[in-house]
Amino acid sequence: MKNNLVIAIDGPAASGKGTLSKLVAKKFNLYHLNSGSIYRALAFMINKFNIKYNDFPKIISLAKSLDLESLDNIELKRDDLAILASKISENLGVRKSLLEFQRALSIKPPFGVGIVAEGRDIGTVVFPKADIKIFINADVEIRAMRRYKELKKTNYNIKLESVKNQLIDRDNRDYNREYSPLKPAEDAYLLNTSKLDIEEGYSAICKIIEEHSANKRN
């Protein structure tokens, strides 16, 4: 693998991109960057300092204080932060303010080798010149069941239909937002995980990366 390698992985919520990105990062000794965590970390700070979610000048100023330690917070998994993160991510100023933070990691990755970055506009906006771009998707019914099983571990009252509706709402925001809508990059590899378990998805994505790297060497 080349130094400063950038692998961009995009896809909707519960498509499997998070788990697969972590596994890929571990296999190839790359730093794992979850762009969603960056927005959730910012949402956490907005709540902490009692800033209104539409006070974008203050939010953009706050974004400049983010660092890697801000991303290492178990609180970031909270549903309310995910919802707030989705709302603030629709603002162009907020997205631009976080671009620098993400791109800086590709120049000087923490592990010194490269990064696996996952999100919703990684291959199209954040790293348009990424070495490898992969778009992961799955049917919404499959994604809803995955998320439902995950949430059921801590919330016994959660309903599958509610989870599905939340995913549909999130998809609508992601695919239709004015700035940086969710879509595959033109040169992205497409991977549908609807009929794949974790092991099969992992094998498929590793095959994409290894074959791409082999073709580059030839």
Image (tube, grey):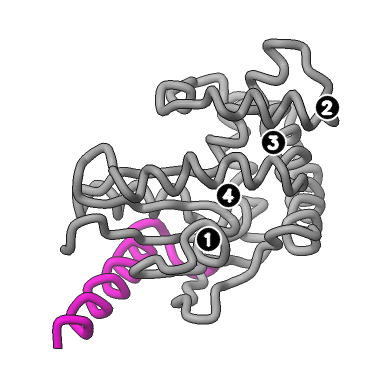
* Amino acid type, mark 4: Arg
Q: Which image quadrant: the N terminus?
A: bottom left
**Eye-nearest disc, 2 or 1:** 2
Q: Marks 2 and 4, how far apart in space?
A: 34 Å
- Which residue does the numbered mark 4 point to in the structure image? 146
Q: Who is closer to the viewer here, 208 or 46?
A: 46
State the image coordinates of residue 178 (x, y, percent, origin top left): 80, 60
- Which residue does the numbered mark 3 point to in the structure image? 85
Left or right position of 80 against 150: right
Q: Identify the secondary structure beneath mark 3.
A: helix
Q: Identify the secondary structure beneath mark 4.
A: helix
Q: Earlier in the sequence, mark 2 or mark 4?
A: 2
State the image coordinates of residue 104 (x, y, percent, origin top left): 40, 44
Q: Who is closer to the viewer here, 210 or 48?
A: 48
Q: Marks 2 and 1, how far apart in space?
A: 28 Å
The span picked out in magenta is 193-218
Q: Earlier in the sequence, mark 4 or mark 1?
A: 1
In this view, which residue lies farthest toward the bottom? Answer: 218
State the image coordinates of residue 113 (x, y, percent, origin top left): 20, 50
Q: Marks 3 and 4, how far apart in space?
A: 21 Å
Q: Residue at x 61, y 36 (%)?
A: 39
Do we see residue 155 in this rendering? no
State the image coordinates of residue 12 (x, y, percent, origin top left): 62, 57
Q: Residue at x 52, y 56 (%)?
A: 126
Q: Who is closer to the viewer here, 183 or 4?
A: 4
Q: Earlier in the sequence, mark 2 or mark 3?
A: 2
- Which residue does the numbered mark 2 point to in the structure image? 55
Tag 3 near tag 4, CB within 8 Å: no
- Which residue does the numbered mark 1 point to in the structure image? 10
